[in-house]
């Protein structure tokens, strides 16, 4: 048997590389390893060996000539079978007889289906905005084989790749990443008690018709265009409200609505710092640190003089870092609460009233949790070398 194995191994791969699969099958029949036909196990009719081409597997299979019923599959893929070669029972021979010793030739004999999966996997990672149809077209141009976009999507899901909307973040340059990393390293030793003394503040703008694409509804299949399942909104926002607020452990400021116009340095002093931050500072007995971002209206000389005159310590904040500010998560929760009301606001006044009421209803535990997450945010930003963090 050893001599038979060696002889057939050499002849097998010589024919496969030089002539192809069809000549190989004819040689196997000539040598008596494969019968030219055998009886169908169900109807006892003669079965013939026909070539089969498939998206998943190419090979040869036995078919009943009368019923066109499939028999055992003879699978030959670049010199390596998927499981084994299946022959009629009287001439059955496992594929191990034909399998050579591990050589360079054997290492190059990969399953075509696996190679196709790897190709699509790598192509999708190289350009993650490539659609499934584009990947199918690329594979058709590269291999000459047609596959559907559903097949591509299914195989990519098997590799752990799913089609999802990308997360939208502010652009970061190398200087921004360096500044964020340096700031996080300077505050790496801060504990939750240190962050509990910080009042995190920011402005946010809410529009009358919510543009949050994450708001979901419950509906039956095929009822997308029913009146109760349609969300009507203007293409361009007709009404928007800017608000300001601050949060810290065991406390929050009142929600301040910025009236007509934009926030300027003087308005920031008159409407935010003096009536809200200064009074909040007086109510806090322990250490107090005020945090605001690097918006133009926050960094004027008049604002800096006002903070120094009131004895309010300001926390230096890195540019382009909304993901480090915990109040951004609170704005998101507030927007969800307003969007989920049974009677959504229909004009400017009802929007202001809804925002004010829902702000007061936000649980303090939510505010405490996002402030306490500052330790993890700093650590995550250091791990990512100043890049975007998942907060």
Image (cartoon, rainbow, N blue to C red):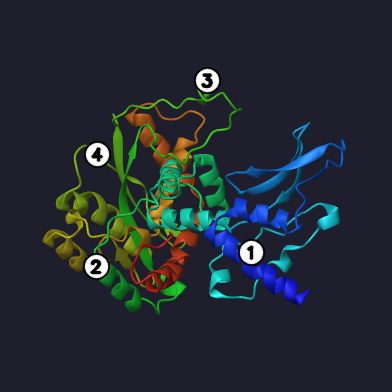
Q: Dot 2, crowdedness within 10 Å: few (<14), some or many (≥20)?
A: few
Residue 12, label in figure? 1
State the residue position of label 2. 174
Say whether disc 4 or disc 2 marks the residue closer to the N-terminus: 2
Q: Name the residue under label 3.
A: 226
Viewer-side label of 4, 1? 1
Mark 4 or 3: in front is 3
Number of numbered discs present?
4
Question: Please, what secondary structure does the residue beneath circle 3 have?
Answer: loop
* Image x and y of residue 177, in percent: 28, 68
* Lower position in the chain sequence, tag 2 or tag 3: 2
Q: Is residue 229 visible?
A: yes
Measured as percent of width and height from the top left, residue 23 is found at: 61, 53
Tell me the distance, in whole angstroms, between the alpha carbons under discs 4 and 1: 84 Å
Would residue 241 appear left or right of 105 to someone viewing this image?
left
Q: Distance between the residues labelled 4 and 3?
A: 38 Å
Which comes before the other along the chain, label 4 or label 1? 1
Q: Do the residues labelled 4 and 3 touch (CB within 8 Å)?
A: no
Which residue corresponds to the image point at 34% horizontal and 73% vertical from the top-left? Answer: 184
Q: Is mark 2 on a helix, strand or loop?
A: helix
Judged left or right of residue 7, residue 127 is left
Q: Nearer the viewer, residue 217 or 345?
A: 217
Q: In which quarter of the image is the N terminus?
A: bottom right
Q: Name the residue under label 4.
A: 259
Which one is nearer the viewer's eye here, 244 or 344? 344
């Amino acid at each position: 048997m050893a001599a038979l194995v060696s002889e057939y191994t050499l002849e097998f791969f010589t024919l496969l590389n030089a002539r192809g699969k069809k000549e190989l099958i004819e040689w196997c029949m000539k040598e008596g390893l494969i019968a030219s036909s055998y009886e169908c196990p169900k109807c006892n009719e003669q079965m013939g060996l026909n070539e089969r081409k498939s998206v998943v597997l190419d090979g040869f299979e036995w078919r009943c000539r009368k019923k066109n019923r499939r028999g055992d599959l003879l699978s030959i893929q670049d010199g390596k079978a998927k499981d084994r070669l299946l022959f009629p029972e009287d001439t059955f021979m496992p594929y191990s007889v034909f399998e050579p010793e591990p050589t360079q030739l054997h290492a190059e004999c990969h399953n075509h289906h696996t190679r196709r999966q790897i190709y699509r996997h790598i192509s999708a990672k190289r350009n993650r905005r490539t659609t499934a149809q584009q990947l199918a077209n690329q594979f058709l141009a590269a291999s000459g084989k047609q596959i559907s976009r559903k097949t591509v999507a299914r195989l990519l899901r098997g590799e752990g790749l799913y089609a999802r909307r990308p997360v939208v973040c502010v652009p970061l340059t190398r200087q921004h990443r360096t500044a964020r990393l340096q700031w996080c390293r300077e505050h790496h030793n801060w504990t939750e008690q240190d962050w509990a003394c910080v009042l995190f503040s920011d402005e946010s703008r809410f529009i009358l018709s919510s543009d949050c694409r994450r708001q979901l509804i419950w509906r039956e299949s095929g009822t997308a265009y029913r009146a109760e399942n349609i969300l009507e909104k203007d293409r361009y926002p007709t009404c928007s409200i800017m608000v300001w607020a601050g949060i810290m452990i065991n406390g929050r400021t009142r929600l301040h609505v910025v009236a007509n116009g934009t926030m300027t340095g003087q308005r920031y002093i008159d409407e935010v710092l003096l009536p809200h931050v200064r009074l909040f500072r007086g109510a806090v007995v322990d250490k107090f640190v005020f945090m605001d971002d690097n918006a133009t209206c926050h960094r004027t000389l008049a604002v800096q003089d006002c903070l120094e005159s009131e004895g309010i310590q300001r926390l230096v904040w890195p540019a382009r870092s909304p993901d480090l500010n915990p109040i951004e998560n609170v704005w998101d929760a507030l927007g969800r609460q307003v969007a989920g009301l049974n009677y959504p606001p229909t004009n400017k006044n009802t929007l202001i009233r809804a925002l004010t009421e829902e702000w007061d209803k936000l649980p303090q535990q939510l505010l405490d949790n996002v402030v306490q997450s500052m330790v993890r945010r700093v650590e995550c930003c250091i791990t990512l070398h100043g890049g975007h963090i998942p907060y």
